[in-house]
Amino acid sequence: MRKVIIIFLILNLFNCCTPKEINSIKNKDLIVAEFEDDKLLEYQLDSMISDMVYQVKLNAINEYFSNLLLDKESKNNNLSRFDYVNATKLEDNDPYLKIELANNSYTNIVKTDSIKANIIYKKAVYQAKIKGLRNNILENNRISISLEKDFHRDFNKKLEGPFLYKSNTGCCVEIIIVSNYECSYCYKMHNELKELVNEYKDIAQFKFVYLSNNLLKFSKAPIAANLQNSFDEMNEFVFEKVKEGTINDSLIIDYAKKLNLNINKFVEDYNSVKIHNQMLDNNDILKDHFIYQTPTLIINNKIYDEPNVINILKNILKNKKIL
């Protein structure tokens, strides 16, 4: 009887509610499976399923556009797709070719059936060429994807950190940027965030939090500069110098002098145990919420870790401003 009631309730949840409404109704502490001392909560299961569904959708989007653009390139060269693909050169050690041959047991078949092996090899070459072309197309053509997951985990702790470009007076949308100076995607997103802050600082706050497995000393420089109201300038400097591969203490202190900071105070804060521990505490809180990758955004206490997270943020801010 109990099983029937549970199934009935679940079916009614899915019939009457959107995914976001279901998230608010579900008991996040409900155990759905366990083994000895290990437990899987419904909340964790929802997150895992959401990740898988999102990846399937993302793969479908990439496949759609890569095929569309491949057909356009073929047409521009006055060739059919088949002829265009076949005209592409392929190296013998091509990784896609190796995978295709392995998936079709080519090594074993070639020993016993040369005719079948030849057919397999030709098909593998064609498939490898298509995959290589699609991959190149996706790398060379920036496809703007605004897809987001159906489920975003809650974030319910306070993180200490400075606000980007004096955006702490904005209302309505609270954004925490979980970033890393050594992350190329973070560098790219940081440059896009500048424009968003300028456009939406009246409705949003942008807080910066550093995440890394190794808390490198230079990451403390912007926090130390923030105590003298110069976070943005030092933050920009550290991003640029890390990208160049030239970051060091001497450069940081010289730049602090250019900013007319009180050097004695800056050096003291730069070497401060308090700042170091504050950043370690942030890292622990983030990892307790299973946040390990950068960039990740926390928007109004929801965790957004999609690879296209900047486009999702743009849509949220745009819709909020319209309202």
Image (tube, grey):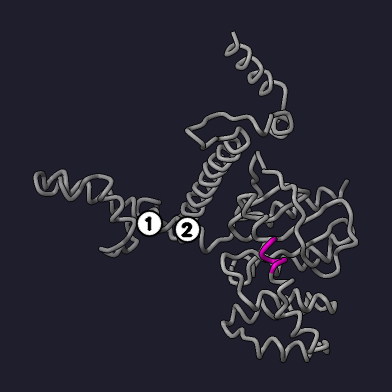
Q: Residue at x 24, y 51 (%)?
A: 122
The residue identified by callout 2 is 73
**Viewer-side residue, 74 vs 5:** 5
Q: Which residues are magenta?
A: 277-281
Question: Does the magenta-highlighted stretch encompass residue 306?
Answer: no
Disc 2 secondary structure class: helix
Quarter of the image that includes the N terminus:
top right
Residue type marked 1: Tyr
Most prominent secondary structure in the magenta stretch? helix
| Quadrant of residue 94 within the rendered picture | bottom left
Residue type marked 2: Glu
Residue 69 position, x and y percent, is 51, 54
Residue 113 position, x and y percent, is 10, 44
Q: Residue at x 65, y 86 (%)?
A: 249
* Residue placed furthest toward the top: 1
Residue 201 position, x and y percent, is 86, 62
**Viewer-side residue, 233 vs 219:** 219
The residue identified by callout 1 is 84
Q: For label 1, count other residues whose C-alpha is less than 10 Å away and answer few (under 14), some (14-19) or many (20+).
A: some
